[in-house]
Amino acid sequence: MARYNLLLAFGGAAAIFAAVGSYTLDVPVSLFDDHAITRLIFGIVGVTALRQSGEPDVTGPQRWNVPFGSLVIAIELISLAHSEGVRAWGFYAAAFAFWLLAWRAVDVILAEQAPRGRNRLLSDLAVPLIFGFTLVVLWEVLARGLQIPMVILPAPSAILGKLFTSLPTLGADFMQTIQGILGGYVIGCGAGILVAVLIDRVPFLQRGLLPLGNLVSALPIVGVAPIMVMWFGFDWQSKAAVVVVMTFFPQLVNTVAGLSAAGAMERDLMKTYAASYGQTLFALRLPSALPFIFNGLKINSTLALIGAIVAEFFGTPIVGMGFRINTEVGRMNIDMVWATIVVAALCGSLFYGILAFIEKRVTFWHASYRQGA
Amino acid sequence: MLKALWSGKTLPVLVVSAILIGLWYVGAILLNGDMQRDAFANANNTNYTFTDLVIGTWSQERPKLPAPDQILAELQKTVIDTAPTSKRSLVYHGTVTLAATLLGFLIGSALGMVLAILVVHVRSLDKSLMPWVVASQTIPIIALAPMIIVIMNQFDITGLVPKSIIAAYLSFFPVTVGMVKGLRSPDPLQLDLMRTYSASRIQTFFKLRIPASVPFLFASLKVGVAASLVGTVVAELTKSEDGGFGARLLAGSYYGQTIQIWAALFAAAACAWALVSLIGLLDRAVTKAMGAR
């Protein structure tokens, strides 16, 4: 029995439907209307996909036909979505075809995937990017096509437009919030590491603090935000204080765990060198604690953002990302809210990325980075 | 006996807690001192003693930092002495928060598990979706909370559901990540053994992968339920008309009722602790039923 590729079969069928279907309600289908070229493209991609669906393994340069075709469909879809008129079933068929064929594109890349090396890295990056791109295209096409009201779900292009037209506002918000985030993060994480090192010599305190630290990490600490706003005022200092409270215990717990990570063999070696406590700490135990310390720093990078943004819900000078989200939601400017969220997301991933980069540089010797080297 | 106490966990925890509470009282003196001196000055009371000052700082109406016993008294007043149906009762607000938290947690963890099972079995999902799930942990998704509430309002969805949705998406990510890790935890030897038994994919899934994932699942459920409570509390800041701990915090911050804020915070903390312990108990029961020693 011949094996059919279902993705290609359904995707191709949908593309052919899209080629002959109506794009606007109550307008009779004519193959030679304004969209004749679009129809032609959908038709070619659809036929190609259908033909390939019957072949067990498509090899050679032909295998890229469908992935390329899905990209072309995406471009046509977006231009259709931006044109006037109520959408009809030909339009939805095209969106459906795009989704299935993009999925097929991912499969093709995965089949190519090399076990390791540069190409592996490339496909590991490409596949999630294609997935993200597909989601954004479908979001754009459906938000525009279905004419979803702006107050419910603005299209990505609208959000991007808003982002670029309100860069000064967003920049000011970012500068305000980042002060609280960084200030609190440095103090909170610094204090966490310092206390962990200080109580290192007193196991009694360690045994007392660790269960408390674990307990605290499960508590809704963001709730201290209103108190900190009362104590330190509306400006960034109160946000920094919330971030300090949120980041201290995770950093403490992780650092304490890290300080006990050095193996007995290495410790014995230090003892045979007659190394002092301080020498052992700086030459052996702190370096071997680094992966744990970085784990804490990474967890805290997200917590710091959450703390600062939520604290701004309780009062700010009229600037800041949390403030912007809260007020623009009230004014139903949902596109501005999304733009702020995009900035916050970029900020969060950048923060995390920088930490991951430093970690890789500093702990290159650790087993988790040496695999496959 | 003494030695066992010293090297155990209970005594150190008690001692450290006592130290922290002591520091708290000292902090209350320092933070409330100025206000107390002003109060004495306003009352033309110039020859107050240090003891008067200290006792004063621990019993103000709206202190900057209420003393722990004031918070406990407020808790007793609002939890035990007030009827649970009253809007002034923390039990009432607690049930509001807990209902949304639990509903959200159930939705979120169920979705998280389903997604994890899909990710483990569909390779293209694993490669395309998982990086986004992991990356989403680095962004403050809680910033979406106010918007979700307002959008739900557009669709006339009110009550428990909008808050639960926020709670659900916060608990969803840790559960997915943990469950995927757990379902992948059987080592190649065990998978090979299943193959030699010519076990089908479904059999391998139920007899090997699922049991192997249980410890990971419970660890991430604990994180998930705590996140779910945080999500509900933050959602209640935007949607404060139904009550809940978040609404209590917001009201307290509007009217400068610090004791009320702290009491709500303590009650929320107790709820979080109870939920996490409950899952811990469940974890132990399930592990025991599975025959672990």
Image: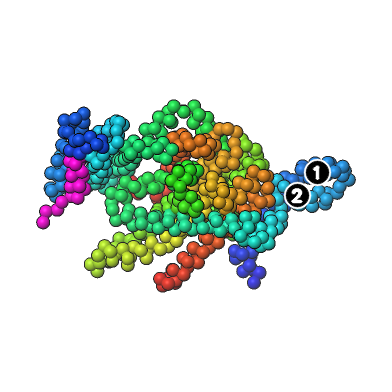
How packed mark 2 is, by other alpha carbons closer than 10 Å (few <14, some 14-19, many 20 or more), is: some
Dominant SS type (magenta): helix
| Residue B121 located left or right of residue B147 | left
Q: Quadrant of residue B76?
A: bottom right
Query: What's the image's color scheme?
Result: rainbow
Q: Which residue is mark 2?
A: B60
What secondary structure is found at the residue carrying circle 2?
loop
How packed mark 1 is, by other alpha carbons closer than 10 Å (few <14, some 14-19, many 20 or more), is: some
Front position in the image: A362 or A316: A316
| Residue B50 located left or right of residue B270 | right
Tell me which label, 1 or 2, sits earlier in the chain.
1
Front position in the image: A14 or A346: A14
Report the magenta residues as a range: A1-18
| Residue A189 located left or right of residue B162 | right
Residue sitting at x 19%, y 41%: A17
Mark 1 and mark 2 in contact? Answer it, CB < 8 Å: yes
Mark number, residue A131: none
Give residue A207's position: percent from left, percent from top: 59, 59
Q: Which residue is mark 1?
A: B39
Give residue B46's position: percent from left, percent from top: 87, 43
